[in-house]
Amino acid sequence: MSDVDGMPEWEKRFRAARVGLPEWALDAPQRCLFVSNATGTYELYAWDRDTGEQRQVTKRPNGTTDGTLTPDGAWVWWFDDTDGDEFGVWRREPFSGGGPAEPAAPGLAPAYSAGLALGRDGTAVVGRSTDADGTTLHVVRPDGSEPVEIYRHRESAGVGDLSHDGALVAVEHTEHGDAMHSAVRVVRTADGTAVAELDDTRGGTEELGLFVMGFAPAAGDTRLLVGHQRRGRWEPMVWDPATGETRELPIDLPGDVGAEWYPDGDALLVVHSYRARSELWRYELGSGALTRVETPPGSVSGATARPDGSVEYLWSSAAEPPAVRSTTGAVVLDPPGLKAPGSRPVEDVWVDGPGGSVHALVQRPTGHGTGPLPTVFEIHGGPTWHDSDAFAAQPAAWLDHGFAVVRVNYRGSTGYGRAWTDALKHRVGLIELEDIAAVRRWAVDSGLADPDRLVLAGASWGGYLTLLGLGTQPEAWAVGLASVPVADYVSAYHDEMEALKAMDRTLLGGTPEEVPERYAASSPLTYVDRVRAPVYIAAGVNDPRCPIRQVENYVDRLAARRHPHAVYRYDAGHGSLVVAERVKQVGLELRFALERLGMPVEEGLPRL
């Protein structure tokens, strides 16, 4: 819709200009890179803070979000795939432009990305993943010589970080076969020989993971900041692979704690995530002092400490749209054009579930009474992710149309401790749906939700849980909306990218051939003949995570029994970075649900 004055509020939230948190070049902090949808497609932009000039770096039909700067700020690297299929190569171009992008590692064939680290001397470590080779890591030198392979394994792995002098690279790997819990190995970039290993999996007797937060930002300093789970939640520790010394940091905060170095290396910028909110702290490595970095209540989606000691962060709440702010009081980036309208705040609800207390976030529409209301259960993906008190345009669209919105942080979600996340094993999908069912009962019994107008909706893993829930809880739901879902778990396994195969083997305890009964129990296709609710499915034809063939298998079964359903196939991958496409998909979901529930349909909503 070209007339902004006549554009509905829900659509404005999607079309409003957005910017991500700027990344700055380590040795040229005035040079930054950020993501924006200013042109209607999410692309990368270079920003010179000295001159104020901003330049669009990438311009591709399906958008670009994966990019980074060299430490000197001279080059922008970005990942070039085909129509969102995530299979491609790295390209680079000068920060200031002036020429076409060139292959950044011309000796490497296309692959799925397994991370990237760029060194101060022009060296790069490029991670690749393919079905044929598993994970390989390659050193690319600035002299144009052939890339040198320094790591190879069938199981999933990835580039963590490069040391300040580029001599060492930290590798996160799952050679032990548990894709949910990584070990960390530091190897020499010169020849790939191992320097040291940190492995908290304890030979498989405990499920403890590690992840790389970054090498110390000082010459000659080999300390590595590593996240660990030794006390039942994520916390940082300092490990020196050169000496083997580890130092766990007594940061006394109740939730998950992530961290990055301040540029001077004397302190850490701590991100504390707890009960669907997040906040910032400064931790002094010398004294152990912990000082609050003031941010408004809500969620910090990203933060970075600048060389002058200030902190820039991307903040939002469910009621207030995102903004990039600074502790100096300034708004760092304020994109011109249409501004996103606000939405409704969330209420916290805790419900007794079969595995413990389940946290749900509830939003109520204005002007529609107290209930019972038509209610959308919007289920997050991941599955190791969580919904938070952060701004989201899709729940706001349902609120605008008179729906209550409930989001459930089921077992498997992050932010509630290691045991809650790791409960997601073997009875995959069924465990999450038990928690969702407990919250659904609360929603009905409390008078919030109309039991005859309950919508189950989600994307990715949320789309998978939607289809599985429609089949295993057929009496509970009036409409199902599944975007880019797993629909046929066996076919999905055989067609998906290798890293996700490794995750499925971890979650289900083997391949479909090794544990067929578990894949059958967790596959929506097993229960498709029990589905009662009308089903809407959206699928990307180039999706490597939830491939199209397994979706078609499910749709064919619905069609064979002439069950009410609609399918929208779009020419992209696991979601779209094109704003107009995203608006269309949300509009199709709104129309499908409103029509099936007998509710008024807004003029102008798209049709299939």
Image (cartoon, rainbow, N blue to C red):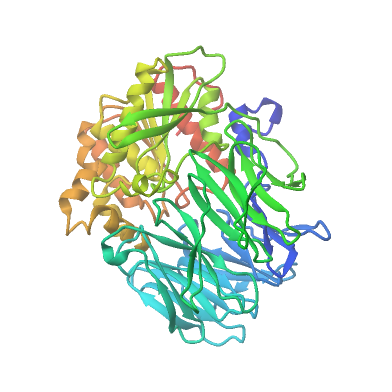
Q: Is residue 290 above or below residue 142?
A: above
> Where residue 605 sits: x, y (%)?
53, 28
Percent of width and height locating residue 255: 48, 45
110 to the left or right of 60: left
Which part of the image, by quadrant, shows the C terminus? top left
Residue pictured at 62% horizontal, 27% vertical = 9
Picture coordinates of residue 343, whole percent (x, y): 60, 28
Is 29 in front, or is 474?
Answer: 29
Q: Is residue 580 something that shows in the picture?
A: yes
- The picture quadrant where one finds residue 439 is top left
Query: Quarter holding the N terminus?
Result: top right
Please report the residue visible at 20 percent of the width from the left and 41 percent of the height from the top: 526
**Residue 539 in view, yes or no:** no
Indicate whether 175 appears above or below 578: below
Left or right of residue 190, residue 207 in this image: left
Q: How many marks?
A: 0
- The front one of 178 and 538 is 178
